[in-house]
Amino acid sequence: MTSSSVVDKPPVRRVAIFGGTHGNELSGVFLVKHWQENGAEIQRTGMEVKPFLTNPRAVKKCTRYIDCDLNRVFDPDNLGRTVVEDIPYEVRRAQEINHIFGPKGSDDAYDLIFDLHNTTSNMGGTLILENSRDDFTIQMFHYIKNALVPECCPVLLIEHPSLKYATTRSVAKHPVGVEVGPQPQGVVRADTVDKMRKIVKHGLDFVQLFNEGKEFPPCTIEVFKIMEKVDYPRNKNEEVIAIIHPKLQDQDWQPLNNGDPLFLTLDGEVIAYKGDCTVYPTFINEAAYYEKKQAFVKTVKVKLTAKHIRSSVLDQNTS
């Protein structure tokens, strides 16, 4: 490996850990509150790590949001809206978060944000990637996945030409979603908290190693790339008329082939999957997505390769 093939990346000095983006997803809420009181386990040499409760009003009410989904309003229109009396609480909160940790897309934005979420779906400990060309984050995910072996740690790539999420974490240069389940809304489980805690620990360890000058050679990871959202069957009144089939329930990340059962009506009719390729569904029967008209998302497996990276701080110190 010649030095010319190494990509120098700026050190990652400012890191935030968000909990409570959805106020009823309690693993992140519990961890962030704990770390605000005692943050020794998340501190690393040469880094500022800030635990932050993103939606305190929703946390207090143990509800997903107050007026609208905080994890969907970090787009230019909402971040640039004039603050008036009737502006949705989450839009105002997004502007505050953007002021503290951004501005989004600027050199002043935080280097890295871990955004901690729970799902009612059987997704295990999942990492969410927003940019397939982000070598630093892909390298981090590769490190985390290896550190967690033999536990599985799927990666969901939400990069899509028409599905735009405008997530809370997208304020950072490197946004990282951590989605752990299954866990019911408004409930905290020790095993789920433990998975989330391990993912954050290994992520912070990676950043410290990177900042200290460790080089990470090219790596390849398998990811599940989002293709489309699939709604429940509905009647003319937009009411759900079929539910997730028992053979699909809890089968996140498992292959789904043409003819496999998807939905079941209360009359016993099975609605099967029709498709010309194998897909891998996830967010299956997520409770929060009924309002979003989403029964699951279809993904396909792809491989992403990250370049050989190292911190440019070493060059700066010797120049």
Image: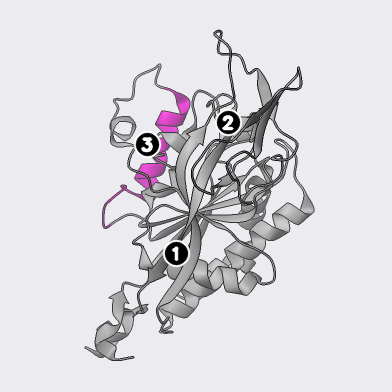
Q: CA distance from mark 2 to mark 3?
A: 25 Å
Q: Earlier in the sequence, mark 3 or mark 1?
A: 3
Q: Which residue is mark 3?
A: 95
**Above or below for 217 versus 197:** below
* Earlier-in-chain disc, 2 versus 3: 3
Type of amino acid at the residue the image marks with label 2: Tyr
Q: Nearer the viewer, residue 135 or 99?
A: 135
Residue indicated by mark 1: 303
Q: Amino acid at mark 1?
A: Lys
Give the residue furthest to the top. Answer: 237
Bounds of the magenta span?
A: 88-107
Prevailing secondary structure of the magenta residues: helix
Quarter that holds the C terminus: bottom left
Earlier sequence position, callout 2 versus callout 1: 2
- Reading the image, the residue beneath label 2 is 289
Kind of residue sitting beneath label 3: Gln
Nearer to me, 131 or 110: 131
Q: Which secondary structure, mark 2?
A: helix
Is 319 covered by the magenta stretch?
no
Q: Residues within 10 Å of mark 1 (few under 14, many from 20)?
A: few
Query: Is label 2 or label 3 in front?
Result: 2
Residue at coordinates 66% horizontally, 72% vertically from top-left? 149
**Residue 241 x/y as whole percent:** 65, 17
